[in-house]
Image (cartoon, grey):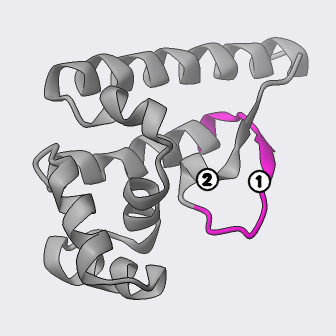
Amino acid sequence: MKLYAESRFRGLDTPCTVTEEVTPEFLDKVIECSEVCEMIGFSVQVIADMVVEFPDNRERIKAMMKRYHVTREQALFALQLPFHEVPLYFDKDEYSRQIKRLKTLRCLVQDMQEVIEGK
């Protein structure tokens, strides 16, 4: 059994939706990218201000990297997060639960891989 997720959740800037296999490494990257929410104080207003101030997505990414000291992937994660997922990451309490869920999923995926590989 394999799980797949859309690449934008990892901060990949692709012209079309690409699906990737959910691996422990993929989930580690999602968790790392989601740290941007903490770094900007769980404020969706930061994203709104960036969109208004910088019409070009490349400029928004550069500005976020400079202002908030985030990686390119983290900036992309914040800017490309689907609206319906915003409550999972931009609410401080829910963010903690979401990270816990992602870490649990990571453990499950790791366990599945180990069973399949016969370890």
The magenta stretch spans which residues?
12-25
Relative to 116, is 69 on the left or the right? Answer: left
Viewer-closest of 57 and 13: 57
Q: Give the percent coordinates (x, y) of residue 96.
A: 24, 23
In three-dimensional space, the C-alpha distance between marks 1 and 2, rounded to whole angstroms, equals 7 Å
Q: Is residue 1 above or below residue 51?
A: above
Q: Residues within 10 Å of mark 2 (few under 14, many from 20)?
A: many
* Label located before the other in sequence (1 or 2): 2
Check if mark 1's residue and mark 2's residue have beta carbons within 8 Å. Answer: yes
Q: Give the percent coordinates (x, y) of residue 5.
A: 71, 36
Q: Give the percent coordinates (x, y) of residue 93.
A: 17, 20
Instruction: Look at the image and tell me in which quarter the N terminus lies.
Output: top right
Location of mark 1 (residue): 17
Relative to 40, is 22 on the left or the right? Answer: right
Q: Residues within 10 Å of mark 1 (few under 14, many from 20)?
A: few
Residue at 38% x, 78% y: name it: 61
Helix, strand or loop status at disc 1: loop
Furthest residue in direction left, as rendered? 41
Q: Is residue 82 above or below residue 40?
A: above
Location of mark 2 (residue): 8
Helix, strand or loop status at disc 2: helix
Residue at 81% x, 11% y: name it: 115
Q: Amino acid at mark 1?
A: Thr
What secondary structure is the stretch in magenta mostly built from? loop
Q: Give the percent coordinates (x, y) of residue 60.
A: 35, 79
Q: Is residue 21 above or below residue 58?
A: above
Q: Is residue 2 above or below residue 37?
A: above
Relative to 115, is 63 on the left or the right? Answer: left
Residue at 30% x, 16% y: name it: 97
Q: Quadrant of residue 56?
A: bottom left
Q: Amino acid at mark 2?
A: Arg
